[in-house]
Amino acid sequence: MSVSIISSEQEIGRDEILGHLRQILADRRFASAERNAGFLRYVVEATLDGRAGEIKETVIANEVYGRSTDYDPRADSIVRVEASRLRQKLRTFYENEGRTSPIRFHLPSGSYVPSFERIAEHPSNPVEPIVEALTLPEVESVTSEGQHPMPRMAFSGRIAVAAGLSILAVVLAILTANRPGSTDSQQSEAIAAFQEGTTLLLQDPHSSATTNGPPKTLIRAIERLELAVSHNPKLAPAWATLAEAYDYASSYVGRDPSEDARRSEAAARRAIALDDKLPAGHHMLALVLKGSKWDFKQAESVYKRTLALDPRNAYAVVEYADLLWEMGRVHEAGEEIRKARALLPALPVLAVKEAEIQLHQNRPDAARATAASAIELNRTYFRAHVALGLADEMKGQLGPALALYEHVLKANPNDRRALPAYGYLLARMGQTERARQVASQLEHMNANLRNCAVQVAVVYAGLGEEKLALDWLETAWRTRQAHFPFAAVEYRFRSLHANMRFRELLSRVGLQPIA
C-alpha cells in the first residue's frame, strides 16, 4: 500500500476534507461523544480557514469547552485529556468503519493542529480488526502549555491496573492467549467483555452514586471480567483487572471481604502465572497481601518486584511507601516517594503522599508547601486540599483548616478523608454536637455503603471518647478494613498510644504505634 502524506489541505481539497469530517462525525463513536466531535470540528475548520496558528490549548478551552478567559492549563487538563481521547477514537475509527477511506485525519502528539493524509492505494484484502474494543487510554505527552494529566482514577487512591497496560501489550496477550478449541465468537466476546469491565473500572466505581452496597457499575465490571477470563483463560491482563475489581468490591457493605480477598489474590496469582513480567499482576497481588491479608513482609517483596518491572507505577509507589511507613520505616518511605517524584514530577498523588509523610515528621510548613504544589498540578485533587488543611491544623490555624475541609465536602459530602478530618477538628474546637453529627454520618456510611470504621474512630478520638474509638478500631480489624494498619501511624490516634487495648489491637497484625 503506497501512502502519500499531504501537509496542506489545498492539496486534497476543502470539500473533500469537509466531506470526510461529516463522515467521521456521523460515526457512532463521535455521534455519542459531543466533546470529541466539537473538538475535531473546531480544529479542522480552523485549519481550513487558515487559522492553524491560533489553535492553542487556551483557545480550544475557550472556544470548545466554554472555559473563561483566565483558563489555566496547569490547573485544568480538559483539553489534553480530550485530545488523547480524540486521537484514540480516530485510530479506532480508521481500524474499523473508516479503514477504506481515501483520507485520514491525524492529530499529532504534542500538537492540536490536524494533518490530512491521502491513502493512494488500499490493500486488496484488508485485515479485519481483531481488537476494536480495546480503547484503553492513551498517555498524553507533556507539552509546553501544561503538565501531564492524571487519568480519571486518581480520586480513588490508585489507578485501575488496566490503565497501566499498553495497547501493544494487550493486543499481544490476546494474540498469544487464544484458548485451544475456542471459537472466533468466544474470542470476540472475551475482548468485548474485557473492554467493558476495564472501562467501568476506569470510571472509578467509588465515585458512583450508591446508597446501599457496591455500585451497579462495579458489579457489572466483575461480571464482564469473569466472562472475559472464562472465554479466554489465558488472558493475563484480564485476570489482573479482575483482581482489582474484587479488591474494590471488598470494602462495600453486603460483600464478604475475606472471599473477595481470596478471589482477588487468586486472580492476581493467575495473571502472574500466565505472564510473570506483567506489572499489573504483581501490583494487585501486593495490594491484596498488604490491604487484605496484612502479610506485610510478603507484600514488601512483591511491591519490590512490581516496581522493578515498572518504576513509574505511581500508585504502587504510594502503597509501598505506606507499607514502609506502617512498619516504622518512615525515612525509607519518604525516600521512595522522593525518587518517584524525580521520575514523575507532575503527579499530585506523589506530592500529597510526601506532604502526609512530612506531617508525620511534624514539618507542617514543608507539608503545606508540598500540598500546595499538588493543587497547582490539579486544583480538583481534593486529597491535596485535605493535606493542606491538616498542615494548617498542625500550625494552629484552625479556621483556615476547617474551611478547606468544608470546601472538599461541598464537592463530595462523603469524602472519606475530609469527613473524619472535619469531625476531628470540630471536636478540637469544642463544637461537640457537630462533631457527633459527623460521627453519625460516618457510622451511617459504614452501615450502608463502605467500611469506614477507622474514620469513625478518628472522630471519637478527637472527642476524647477512647472506648468508642477503640471499639470502632476493633470493628475495623474484625471486618478487615484495608485502612486498619494505618492506625499505627495516624497522628490523630497518638492520644491512644499508651492504651494497652490500642497496642494489643495493632499487635494482632504485627504492628506497634509509630510516633
Image (tube, grey):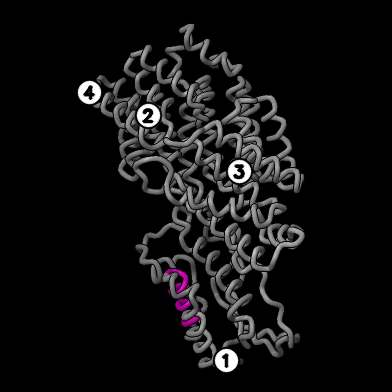
Separation of marks 3 and 4 at Cα, in angstroms:
42 Å
Amino acid type of the residue that numbered disc 4 sits on in the rendered structure: Glu
Q: Earlier in the sequence, mark 2 or mark 3?
A: 3
Residue 10 shows which numbered tag?
1
Q: Position of residue 232 (x, y in %)?
A: 68, 56
Q: Which residue is mark 3?
A: 243
Label 4 sits on residue: 433
Pick whichever of labels 4 and 1 is earlier in the sequence: 1
Q: Main secondary structure of the magenta part?
A: helix
- The magenta span reads 35-45
Q: Earlier in the sequence, mark 2 or mark 1?
A: 1
Q: CA distance from mark 4 to mark 1?
A: 71 Å
Of all residues, the one furthest to the front in this rendering is 181
Instruction: Label 4: state its secondary structure.
Output: helix
**Which residue is disc 2 drawn over?**
421
At label 3, counting other C-alpha atoms closer than 10 Å, the crowd grade (few under 14, some 14-19, many 20 or more) is many
Q: Is residue 380 left or right of residue 355?
A: left
Give the amino acid type for the residue marked by disc 3 in the picture: Ala
Distance in Å between CA atoms under marks 2 and 4: 15 Å
The residue that appears at 38% across and 34% down in the rendered structure is 418
Q: Quadrant of residue 170?
A: bottom right
